[in-house]
Image (cartoon, helix red, strand yellow):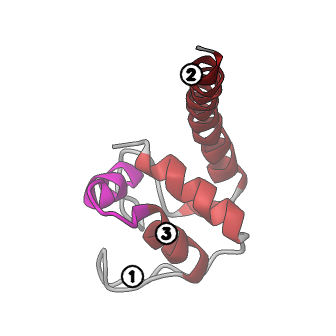
Amino acid sequence: MKKFLLPLAIAGALFSAQAVTAQEAAEGGEALFKSKPCAACHAVDAQLVGPALNAVAAKYADEENAVETIAANIKNGSSGQWGAIPMPPNQVTDDEAKLLAEWVLTLN
């Protein structure tokens, strides 16, 4: 019986820790968004110079590598995906770009 209880307890702890981490990531992503110049071109629910972030989330919602794709676009910039105005590269670390991408995907 003990053989089954310990792995079950560990699995339960891991699943509950992931839920907290996802919430913390969402809060951290929003705070990071507000601390960077992202808001000069993007809003959550309205198109400015760039697309609304909830539109980005909707576009990539079913994509398998969505976090990596969005993070790469944030860090390296992109062009031609949302119109004629290119998005320049941003001064963010790989971890910051990933956190921002994860947060954007929660907006769908």
Q: Distance between the residues labelled 2 and 3?
A: 36 Å
Mark before the other along the chain sequence, 1 or 3? 3
Q: What residue type is labelled 2?
A: Phe
Q: Distance between the residues labelled 1 and 3?
A: 22 Å
Q: Residue at x 37, y 44 (%)?
A: 45
Question: Which quadrant holds the N terminus?
Answer: top right
Q: Give the range drawn in magenta.
A: 52-66
| Comparing labels 1 and 3, the label whose residue is closer to the camera | 3
Q: Check residue 85 in the rendering and tell me which mark sits there, or answer none.
A: 1
Circle 3 Cα neighbour tier, 10 Å, few/some/many (<14 / 14–19 / ≥20): some
Give yes or no for contact between labels 2 and 3 (Cβ–Cβ under 8 Å): no
Tell me: 106 left or right of 6: left
Question: Which quadrant holds the C terminus?
Answer: top left
Q: Determine the secondary structure under disc 3.
A: helix
Asked which quadrant contains residue 74, the reply is bottom right
Q: Residue at x 27, y 60 (%)?
A: 59
Q: Name the residue under label 3.
A: 68
- Front position in the image: 9 or 63: 9
Q: Name the residue under label 2.
A: 4
Q: What residue type is labelled 3?
A: Glu
Circle 2 Cα neighbour tier, 10 Å, few/some/many (<14 / 14–19 / ≥20): few
- Front position in the image: 56 or 4: 4
In this view, 7 is above or below 82: above
Question: Could you tell me how many numbered marks the image carries?
Answer: 3
In this view, 25 is above or below 55: above
Mark before the other along the chain sequence, 2 or 1? 2
Q: Which residue is drawn at 62% across and 23% down?
A: 3
Tell me: 3 left or right of 66: right
Tell me: 81 left or right of 106: left
Answer yes or no: is residue 39 visible. Answer: no
Q: Which residue sits furthest top?
A: 1
